[in-house]
Image: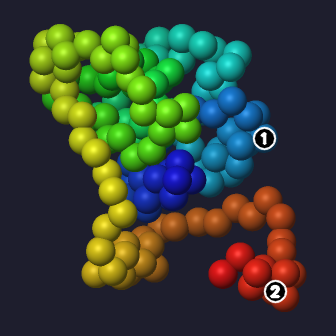
């Protein structure tokens, strides 16, 4: 999901900052045009790095895929009036006492849930990607007979 988001951001001409625990995945993200990458295992307070990269302003949009361990950091990395879109949860959805409504209210920030769209939305996305500046960076090739098993 994060790679799709990166490709969409780049196709729209946006600056994208990517986080991962894998340096290999971060290298792949840089190949695809990520403006900056942060390894959250070696930089556990990665929200501070995001703020540094944005001159203290924060980002306009976070696509939150981590869940209960990262939501507070995602909110902290955003600017006033921004959105944190929850698109999945690698670590589960039990946010417990982590979520502070004050962090959202004081920064006029929004949490937004994202779910799979309609076929029409998918076709519009494909049109956008076809006409946009989408790039590919393949890490490996799968022979066609093998690749069809994933369909």
Circles 1 and 2: CB atoms closer than 8 Å:
no
- For disc 1, the neighbor class at 10 Å (few under 14, some 14 to 19, many from 20) is few
Residue shown at 48% from the left, 67% from the top:
133
Q: Choose top left, top right, bottom left or bottom right for residue 19.
A: top right
Residue 29 appears in the rendering: yes
Image height of 31 relative to 45, above or below: below
Task: Give percent across and percent down for residue 2.
Answer: 53, 48
For mark 1, give the secondary structure: helix
Quadrant position of the C terminus in the picture: bottom right
- Per the image, label 2 sits on a secondary structure element best described as helix
Left or right of 148, for residue 127: left
- Count neighbours of disc 2 (C-alpha within 10 A) and say few if under 14, some if 14 to 19, many if 20 or more: few
Vertical arrangement, residue 91 with respect to residue 75, above or below: below
Q: Quick one: label 1 or label 2, which is nearer the N terminus?
A: 1
Location of mark 2 (residue): 144
Q: Which residue shows up at 33% across the image and 80% down it? A: 119
Residue 56 in view (yes/no): no
What residue is drawn where x is 28% and y is 81%? 120
Q: Nearer the viewer, residue 103 or 28?
A: 103
Q: Position of residue 20 (x, y in %)?
A: 63, 33
Seen from this angle, which residue lies furthest bottom?
A: 145
Residue 7 picture location, percent across and down = 51, 58
Q: Position of residue 5 (x, y in %)?
A: 46, 53
Cα separation between marks 1 and 2: 25 Å
Q: Mark 1 or mark 2: which is in front?
A: 2
Along the line of sight, the residue nearer the viewer: 82 or 73:
73
Question: Based on the displayed image, in which of its 4 quarters is residue 147 positioned?
Answer: bottom right
As drawn, the label of residue 24 is: 1
């Amino acid at each position: 999901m994060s790679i799709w988001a990166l490709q969409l951001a780049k196709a729209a001409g946006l600056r994208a900052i990517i986080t991962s625990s894998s340096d290999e995945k971060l290298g792949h993200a840089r190949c695809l045009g990520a403006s900056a990458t942060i390894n959250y295992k070696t930089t556990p307070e990665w929200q501070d790095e995001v703020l540094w990269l944005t001159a203290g302003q924060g980002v306009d949009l976070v696509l939150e895929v981590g869940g209960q361990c990262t939501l507070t950091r995602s909110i902290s990395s955003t600017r006033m009036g921004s959105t944190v879109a929850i698109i999945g949860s690698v670590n589960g959805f039990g946010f417990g006492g982590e979520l502070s409504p004050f962090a959202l209210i004081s920064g006029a920030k929004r949490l937004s849930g994202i779910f799979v769209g309609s076929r029409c939305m998918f076709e519009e996305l494909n049109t956008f990607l076809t006409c946009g500046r989408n790039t590919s960076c393949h890490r490996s090739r799968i022979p066609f007979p093998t690749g069809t098993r994933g369909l």
